[in-house]
């Protein structure tokens, strides 16, 4: 009887090893789940950035105000009849 119990225990341990530490075991599953969560967070951040860029592109294609704002900020362009005043810092 004792030998049978030891044999069953050995078989149980032999079947549990691949389940926990094998190639497709629970520990590997936990690791992969953590990687999936990290990639999902990265994808969500990239999707938000892409949506913001898409909105900016649509605004630049359809709206004249966005083009005008870019021209004023980046190129210092002005409309006809306006004056651009730049105040330069004192040079020592």
Image (tube, rainbow, N blue to C red):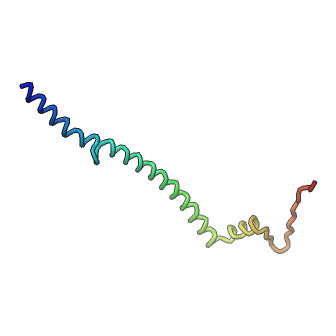
Residue 83: horizontal and vertical position, in percent?
87, 68
Residue at the extreme top of the image, as rendered: 2
Identity of the residue drawn at 68% across and 71% down: 64
Q: Residue at image x 11%, y 32%?
A: 7
Q: Nearer the viewer, residue 90 or 73?
A: 90
Would residue 59 be found to the left or right of residue 15 on screen? right
Image height check: is 69 above or below 46?
Answer: below
Q: Quadrant of residue 79?
A: bottom right
Residue extending furthest front?
Answer: 3
Residue at 19% x, 38% y is 14
- Residue 60 is situated, as x and y percent measured from the top left of the image, at 64, 70
Left or right: 85 in relation to 28? right
Total numbered circles = 0
Closest to the observer: 57 or 3?
A: 3
In-image side of 76 versus 11 (left or right)? right
x and y percent of residue 33 in the render? 38, 47
């Amino acid at each position: 009887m004792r030998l049978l119990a030891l044999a069953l225990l050995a078989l149980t341990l032999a079947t549990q090893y691949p389940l926990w530490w094998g190639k497709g075991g629970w520990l590997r599953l936990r690791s992969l789940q953590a990687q999936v969560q990290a990639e999902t967070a990265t994808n969500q951040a990239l999707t938000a950035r892409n949506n913001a860029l898409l909105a900016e592109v649509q605004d630049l294609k359809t709206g004249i105000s966005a083009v005008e704002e870019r021209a004023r900020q980046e190129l210092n362009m002005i409309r006809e009849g306006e004056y651009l005043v730049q105040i330069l810092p004192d040079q020592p």
